[in-house]
Structure formats: C-alpha cells, structure tokens
Image (spheres, rainbow, N blue to C red):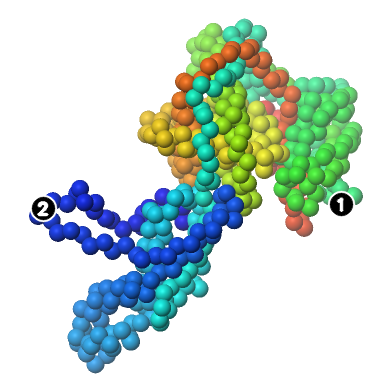
C-alpha cells in the first residue's frame, strides 16, 4: 500500500481549532499501538505492530453493537436475540470484519505517526493474521521507503549551458532526416555502402546454440548497430561492399542487464544473411507533399518549423546536461543502497519516462529507438541514478511547495501529440490507460524543480555540437529473452518497420 493509499484509509479527525463552544469534543479513538521499526537498509523498513487488547475489545464491542439490531438468529425475531448468542453465531464474520478494520486503521495511524515516507505497499500477509482470543494482536511487514538524507546545498550552483545558433546547414541535415520517413526504398544491384538499407536474416548464437533470430529485418547501414543488450561497433565496415546472398559475421559483448540472465556479460556470435540491398530515394518538396507533411504552404514554412523543432531539441539537450550537472552535485553524497527489487520494478518506469521526454522534445522514432536501446543496455545503473535524483528533487519540491497543475499536464500532452501526429485527447487517453499519468506528473514536478535550481545558479555558456546519427537500433535482444524457446522475430516485432514503399 503506497503512501497516498494509506492516506485514504486514515480516520477523519477534528482538531481543537475546528470546535465551537456549542460542539461536543470528539473522543480520541486512535489505537494504542506499539510500533517497532527496524532499518535493514536506507530504503527498507521492517515494522512490527502490536495492537492492544483494549482496542481489539473496543472494535469487537462496536461491531456487535452495530450488528445487534439486524442480527438474524434462528428461534428469535430479527434484532431480539441475546448478545451472547449473536456473538457465538457471528464470531467468525465479525472477526474477519474487525481484522480488516484494525489493519487499515493501524496502517493509517502508522502513516501519520512514523517519520518515513512509503514508496511501496506493505507486504502484510492478511491470510495469516488472526484475532486472538486473549491478549494483543501482533503483525509485521516490510515496506520500501524514501531514504533519509541530509539535503545538499542547491542554491548558487555553477553550471555549464550548451548554446547554438542553428544554421541553414543544420536545417538541411534535419530536413533530410525528416524526408527519410517518406522516402522510397529502391533495389540496388551494386555493393552496399554507408547510408544504404539492407534486408537481412539475422541469427545470434552462443557455443553453436541459437539464441535469437529475425527474418527479413530491414536496417540502415550505420557505424553502430544497437541492440537492447549490446552494441556492434563497426557495423558499417562489416557490411561495406556486401551484396545479396552474402553472409557476414560478428561478435557482440552483452551487457550485465541483458534480458536473458544466462548469457549476461558473455560474447555472442551474430550472423547476417543479406537478402537485398536498397537505396533511399527522397521525395521532392512539391506543393502536395508539403501539405502531406504538415499542411505547410511553402518550403520556407517547413524550414521554419524545422528550426523551431531544432530549438526544442536543443532545449532538451540543455536540460539533460544541466540536470546531469545538478544531480551529480546533489547526489554526490547519496551513497545509500537501493533494494534490487525496487530497481527492477522501476526500470521500466524510468525507461518510459525517458522516452516520454524524448517525444516531448520532438525527436524522431528512429532517434528515440537508438537512445532507448542505450538506456536498456545500462538499465540498472540508469535506474539507480534516476531514483536517487528523484528522491532529492522530490524533497526540494516539497520544501518549495511545487506541484503539477492541470495546465502543466495539458502542455506536456500537447507537445507529445504534436510530435506523434495524434490528437491531444487520444494521447492523454493512451497515457491514462497505461497508468503513466504519475510518471508524467513526476516529470512535470522535476522539471519545475530544475527550473528553480537553475534560477539560483550561475551559468557559463559553451557551444553545443549535435551528435551525429551514427546508430541504427533494433529491438531484438541479441542474447534472446531467456527461456527454452528461441525467439523468432520479424521486422514488425523489432520495430524496424521498413517496407518497400516507406522508411520509418
């Protein structure tokens, strides 16, 4: 049960200043709890709770008082049976009822009184919990909490900021990237070169045991071929000059975060069978095509839109660099260990958050895939770093009373929708369906905190040099997904959805 869920079950109470002279004082019905908290690690608490017998009897008495008027006991009219018979008849049902009430009220009170902030649900074994015939009731649970730490100094940081005035050449390069989404692939009889496209069958193996395969996978020849669990450097040199029916082999060292635990850190063999070489034919910027791309009236309007998108991407890079500097400074002393279970559960959320930020910043799906693979290759490290950053930024947000407002959500969703080409309403529905609104909320709050920290910082501007698009990404894990069955992927399944008529 998370902290916000615990809050929902807290009993409503009135403070002294809400009482008037004509209102009776409200009796304090808080439980007489004995709570023992142990700290196995910075983010874990083992809690043992003892509920006093007097509270158990009080809950039982109240439950039977509520039941008496409607109790149906054979041989008696409804509501007229003796108390002892009612207690005997409904002992089990009432016991289950007050067990749940005592548990919920205890957890709510602990949430009020303890000085830790829960970030997960308590693992209470409700089935094993029994209301004792005599004496107190004891139960225990483990819960993940936000670590306690001394807040670092965040005002007056000295930061570097990337700046760039985009040129016509920058716009030309970005325009070419955009046009590849609408280009046509045409067969090429000659040898393959950098920038060409290949249709390949790909197989990975270790010690002659097949791990994964992909049929008719379309990929562009770039210096690096990126998998979720490793990278093949020099892919362009490996494939250079290849023709249909050629086979090329390479080795890829898998990361320690590879999905297939059995082959983590090992080096696997990759074989490419070239089925076809293709070249990309870019479309002409005709009046009809400009309208298809985004209802642009002229090429100049398109170039202006590209300039604006480049500026959004620069702002993203600025924020990432500044965030990295801020969080590196703030987390310098954050040497607390995070539970492996927490890291494993949060890794997917951290990836979703990063992808959402990239879409907001206007990056293409091709660029997002490349960055997504890099994040997956370093999943544990990036998740641990992200969580430590989150805990510190969350503390600053609480101290500064920073919250996410509805207008903030609308702005974020609008920017994501503008990149995806879908309506803001549809994008919001998709985010809500996937349970990602809390991720979006954290993203908004963290961005506001970073803006607050930047407002108190001192900057030194440095020129920004965009990274070249040297990475081709596929979503097929080179080491497979684990298990006994060898995954057999198609181009669609690996998100390399390139067809004869279109390049994504």
Image quadrant where residue 354 sits: top right
Residue 52 rendering spot, x and y as whole percentages: 38, 71
Left or right, 471 with reference to 445:
right
Label 2 Cα crowd, 10 Å radius (few <14 / some 14-19 / many 20+): few
Residue shown at the point (27%, 90%) measured from the top left? 74
- Is residue 379 shown above or below 315? below
Where is residue 276, by image quadrant? top right
**Would you identify the image quadrant in which residue 99 lies?**
bottom left
- Upstream in sequence: badge 2 or badge 1: 2
Alpha carbon of mark 2 to alpha carbon of mark 1: how far? Answer: 83 Å
Q: Name the residue located 56 percent from the left edge and 50 percent from the top edge.
A: 43
Judged left or right of residue 341, residue 152 is left
Q: Secondary structure at mark 2?
A: loop
* Relative height, residue 156 to residue 48 (above, below): above
Whole-percent x, y for residue 90 in the image: 33, 82
Identified at 43% across, 73% down, the residue is 137
Q: Position of residue 254 (x, y in %)?
A: 79, 42
* Secondary structure at numbered mark 1: strand
Q: Residues within 10 Å of mark 1 (few under 14, many from 20)?
A: few
Quadrant including the C terminus: top right
Mark 2 or 1, closer to the camera: 2
Q: Which mark is residue 209?
A: 1
Between residue 432 and residue 409, name the one nearer to us.
409
Residue extending farthest to the left is: 22
Q: Nearer the viewer, residue 430 or 15?
A: 15
How far across and down, in percent of the image, does residue 119 sit?
50, 49
Residue 215, visible in the rendered structure: no
Is residue 381 visible in the rendered structure shown here?
Answer: yes
Q: Which residue is mark 2?
A: 21
């Amino acid at each position: 049960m998370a902290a916000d869920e615990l809050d929902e079950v807290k009993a409503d109470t009135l403070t002294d200043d809400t009482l008037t002279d004509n209102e009776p004082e409200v009796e304090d019905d808080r439980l007489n709890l004995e709570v023992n908290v142990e700290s196995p690690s910075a983010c874990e608490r083992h809690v043992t709770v003892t509920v006093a017998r007097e509270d158990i009897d009080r809950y039982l008495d109240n439950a039977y008082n509520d039941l008496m008027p409607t109790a149906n006991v054979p041989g008696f009219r409804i509501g007229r049976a003796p108390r002892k018979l009612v207690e005997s008849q409904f002992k089990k049902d009432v016991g289950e009822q007050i067990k749940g009430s005592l548990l919920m009220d205890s957890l709510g009170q602990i949430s009020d009184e303890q000085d830790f902030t829960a970030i997960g649900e308590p693992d209470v074994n409700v089935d094993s919990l029994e209301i004792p015939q005599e004496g107190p009731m004891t139960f225990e649970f483990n819960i993940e909490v936000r670590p306690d730490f001394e807040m670092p100094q965040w005002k007056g940081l000295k930061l570097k900021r990337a700046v760039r005035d985009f040129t016509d050449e920058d716009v030309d390069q970005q325009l070419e990237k955009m046009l590849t989404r609408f280009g046509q692939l045409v067969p090429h009889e000659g040898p393959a070169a950098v920038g060409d496209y290949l249709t390949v069958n790909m197989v990975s193996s270790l010690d002659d045991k097949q791990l994964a395969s992909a049929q008719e996978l379309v990929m562009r020849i770039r210096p690096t071929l990126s998998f979720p669990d490793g990278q093949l450097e020099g892919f362009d040199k490996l494939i250079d000059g290849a023709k249909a029916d050629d086979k090329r082999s390479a080795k890829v060292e898998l990361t320690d975060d590879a999905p297939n635990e059995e082959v983590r850190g090992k080096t696997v063999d990759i074989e490419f069978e070239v089925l076809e070489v293709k070249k990309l034919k870019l479309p002409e910027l005709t009046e009809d095509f400009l309208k298809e791309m985004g209802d642009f009236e002229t090429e100049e309007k398109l170039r202006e839109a590209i300039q604006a998108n480049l500026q959004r991407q620069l702002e993203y890079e600025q924020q990432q660099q500044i965030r990295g500097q801020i969080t590196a400074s703030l987390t310098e002393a954050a040497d607390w260990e995070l539970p492996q279970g927490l890291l494993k559960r949060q890794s997917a959320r951290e990836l979703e958050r990063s992808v959402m930020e990239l879409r907001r910043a206007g990056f293409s799906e091709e660029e997002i895939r490349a960055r997504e693979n890099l994040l997956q290759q370093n999943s544990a490290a990036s998740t641990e770093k992200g969580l430590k950053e989150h805990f510190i930024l969350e503390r600053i947000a609480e101290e500064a009373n920073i919250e996410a407002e509805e207008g903030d959500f609308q702005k974020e969703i609008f920017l994501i929708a503008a990149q995806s080409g879908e309506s803001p309403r549809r994008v919001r529905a998709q985010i809500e369906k996937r349970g990602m609104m809390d991720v979006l909320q954290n993203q908004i709050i963290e961005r506001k905190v970073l803006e607050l920290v930047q407002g108190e910082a001192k900057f030194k501007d440095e020129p920004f040099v965009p990274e070249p698009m040297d990475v081709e990404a596929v979503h097929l894990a080179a080491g497979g997904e684990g298990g006994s069955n060898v995954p057999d992927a198609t181009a669609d399944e690996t998100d390399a959805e390139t067809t004869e008529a279109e390049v994504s």
